[in-house]
Amino acid sequence: EGLLKRAEESFVAREKLGLEGQDMIRAGDCYIRVHDAGEVMMSTLAHVFYYLNDTIVADGRLEWVRPHKLEQYELAPGVSEIISRTFFRDPYFFEEYNVELRKT
């Protein structure tokens, strides 16, 4: 199991972020329920991980953003809540987020 876990972490780091030799840190789990006019449209269980790495360079694909300015960006439902929660680096969290669908 340990070898498989490391292989999956390595794949995610390399494929999604272009990182080599990085350890994934499990932050926690959360349910995200997206509502539209009070009706639940979608419910998702998210497993949340992060990396500690100062070498990631912002480019056309990646951008450094301050957590308190996330509301200025068009993000998937629940992303700003998850980032705010992981900011405190607790050993593990479990949360349930109810968010209203944004219509653009």
Image (cartoon, helix red, strand yellow):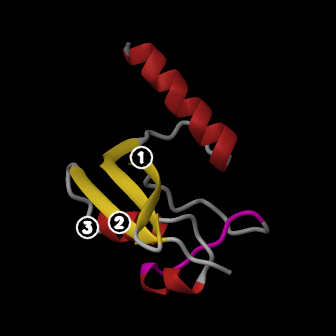
* Magenta highlight range: 61-67
Q: Main secondary structure of the magenta part?
A: loop
Label 2 belongs to which residue? 98
Query: Quadrant location of the N terminus?
Result: top left
Query: Neighbour class for label 1 at 10 Å: few (<14), some, many (≥20)?
Result: some
- Residue in the image at 42% along x and 85% along y: 68
x and y percent of residue 89 in the render?
26, 60
- The picture places residue 77, in percent across and down from the top left corner, at 51, 65
Q: Is residue 3 visible?
A: yes
SS at mark 2? Answer: strand
Residue labelled with disc 3: 88
Amino acid of disc 3:
Phe
Q: Nearer the viewer's eye, disc 2 or disc 1?
A: 2
Q: Quadrant of residue 56?
A: bottom right
Say if mark 2 contacts mark 3, CB within 8 Å.
no
Kindly identify the amino acid type of the residue bearing the numbered disc 1: Ala
The answer to whether residue 20 of the structure is visible from this angle is no
Magenta stretch: residue 65 in it?
yes
Nearest to the observer: residue 59 or residue 76: 76
